[in-house]
Amino acid sequence: MFSNAHIGIDLGTANTLVYTKSKGIIIDEPTVVAVNTKTREIIAFGHKAKEMIGKTPAFIEVIRPLKDGVIADFDITTQLLKLIMQNASKKLGTSLRKPSVVVCTPSGATSVERRAIQDAVRQSGAKEVQLMEEPVAAAIGAGLPVNEPVASMIVDIGGGTTEVGIISFGGVVASNTVKDAGDKMDESIIHFIRKEYNVLIGEPTAEEIKKTIGHALLPHEVEHMDVRGRDVVTGLPKIIHLSSTQIQGVLAESLSAILEAIRATLEICPPELAGDIVDHGVVLTGGGALLKNIKEWLTSVIEVPVHIAPEPLQSVAIGTGKSFFVSERKQKVAK
């Protein structure tokens, strides 16, 4: 039922992952491409392209073809998917011809956005393309009992969007999507440093600040970090000294938006399933689940147990791949 011809793809705003049964995660690359502006061809993608951000000549542009979980540049995304398919074929040591692909989409994506993702994957060489909602994929990847009549609540804090979903019997009972996620946090850090210190920094530096001294909204032992950027006034390099309490304040707006999305989803949850969430709690996935103290903070404000998935960064990709088995079990249940 599941061979190398079946693959799961997490086409995320921040990272793209490919999962197969035989080898697990075979590709985990940033969703970043370096494009020749004259020919519109991709000359590098993934980690190589990310290292080029802010360091390229005029004829090379480093872009992210997905924004807020959906395709922003269709042609570049199609080229990127073809390269990913080729790399997957090399890593599997076989010719990956016309594979069946399951790819995730945000639960709030429109029919036009879903069709764009489906068309891009099909044009990259897929024989069959199935779309799957991100909360369901994340829940399967986190090992939750999605096929049972028990509520599983998942909060997937990705790069472009935060997906909140309550899942039962393999489907989404209630969901919410907000655009406050990893990228929005990085943008907030960039704007804060420019406003407070008149210093410009890039996205990679902002991400590093978030990972190193970023904290959720709880008291903590203050940490410090030296950051290098360019002074707006003099144009010269400059080093500034940041504290974790400053960055905590910067992240407050995005974290509050994520909290409101969780509360709004709980409010529309059927009463019969609410008890399951109180018993089993909420599971966090995505890169945002790695933010310091986020588990403890959410537990304190929503008064429900909060857990972090075993592999938060890979949960969606693993879920898309394992969905072949979930579909098979559902068919058996239906019979």
Image (tube, rainbow, N blue to C red):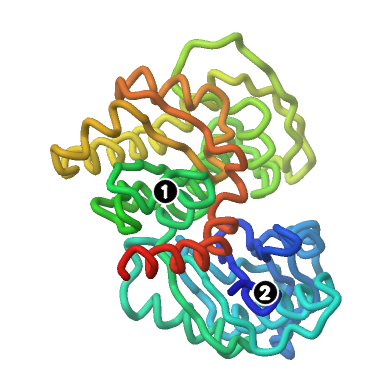
Q: Looking at the image, can residue 233 be seen?
A: no
Rounded to the nearest whole Å, what is the CA distance between mark 2 and mark 1? 31 Å
Q: Residue furthest left?
A: 271
The answer to whether marks 2 and 1 mark residues whose Cβ atoms lie closer than 8 Å is no
Side of 172 where 30 appears, left or right: right
The one nearer the camera, 198 or 227, is: 227
How many residues crowd mark 1 within 10 Å: few (<14), some (14–19), many (20+)?
many
Side of 278 where 249 appears, left or right: right
| 114 is higher (above) or lower (below) than 177 | below
Residue at x-position 74% and y-position 59% = 50
Q: Looking at the image, can residue 179 be seen?
A: yes
> Residue 322 occupies which quadrant of the picture?
bottom right
Residue at x-position 27% and y-position 33% = 276
Image coords of residue 179 (percent x, y): 39, 52
Amino acid at dot 2: Ser
| 267 is higher (above) or lower (below) than 170 | above
Amino acid at dot 1: Thr
- For disc 1, the marked residue is 162
Q: Quick one: SS at disc 2?
A: loop
Side of 331 where 287 appears, left or right: right
Side of 332 where 36 appears, left or right: right
| 214 is higher (above) or lower (below) than 98 | above
- For disc 2, the marked residue is 3
